């Protein structure tokens, strides 16, 4: 039965079905099937540093520090903000 197995085709099918795997190697040693798997590492997320971004918090709070390297911040240290959705953020 092991002679009928097409290990290359099985490897290709596994790679196509499971996106988290980048490499798989199958080999038969006697009655054992050896499986070596390398997990795919995703590239880091590219952060756009040229355009402003919205920063959201889980809870209401007071802004204690602001580090603005470019542009003009829309809030100041000491402002109390309410809400978790950017559309609901407002000064209190």
Image (cartoon, rainbow, N blue to C red):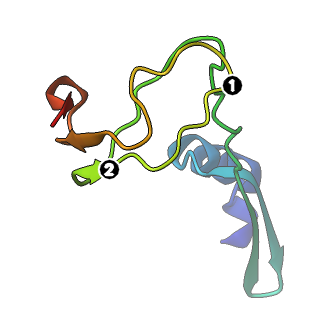
- Residue at point 54%, 50% (across, down): 18
Q: What residue occupies the far bottom of the structure in this picture?
A: 31
Q: Is residue 9 left or right of residue 25?
A: left
**Where's the C terminus, which quadrant?**
top left
x and y, in percent, of residue 38 in the image: 76, 60
Callout 1: SS? loop
> Which sits in the foreground, 44 or 33?
44
- Residue at point 82%, 86% (across, down): 30
x and y, in percent, of residue 48 in the image: 62, 19
> Which sits in the foreground, 88 or 63?
63
Q: Is residue 29 left or right of residue 56?
A: right
Does residue 46 lie above or below 33 as drawn? above
**Where's the N terminus, which quadrant?**
bottom right
The answer to which image quadrant residue 74 occupies is: top left
Q: Residues within 10 Å of mark 1 (few under 14, many from 20)?
A: few
Q: Residues within 10 Å of mark 2 (few under 14, many from 20)?
A: some
Marking on residue 69: 1
- Residue at point 61%, 36% (across, down): 67
Does residue 84 lie above or below 1 as drawn? above
- Residue at point 56%, 45% (across, down): 19
Marking on residue 10: none
Marking on residue 62: 2
> Which sits in the foreground, 16 or 42?
42
Callout 2: SS? strand
x and y, in percent, of residue 75 in the image: 39, 27
x and y, in percent, of residue 69 in the image: 68, 25
Disc with the residue nearer the chain's start (2 vs 1):
2
């Amino acid at each position: 039965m092991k002679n009928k197995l097409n290990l290359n085709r099985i490897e290709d099918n596994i790679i196509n079905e499971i996106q988290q795997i980048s490499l798989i190697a199958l080999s038969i040693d006697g009655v054992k099937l050896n499986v070596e798997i390398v997990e795919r590492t995703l590239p880091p997320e590219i952060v756009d540093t040229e355009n402003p971004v919205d920063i959201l918090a889980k809870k209401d709070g007071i802004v204690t520090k602001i580090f603005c390297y470019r542009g003009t911040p829309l809030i100041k240290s000491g402002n109390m903000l309410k809400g978790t959705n950017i559309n609901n953020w407002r000064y209190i």
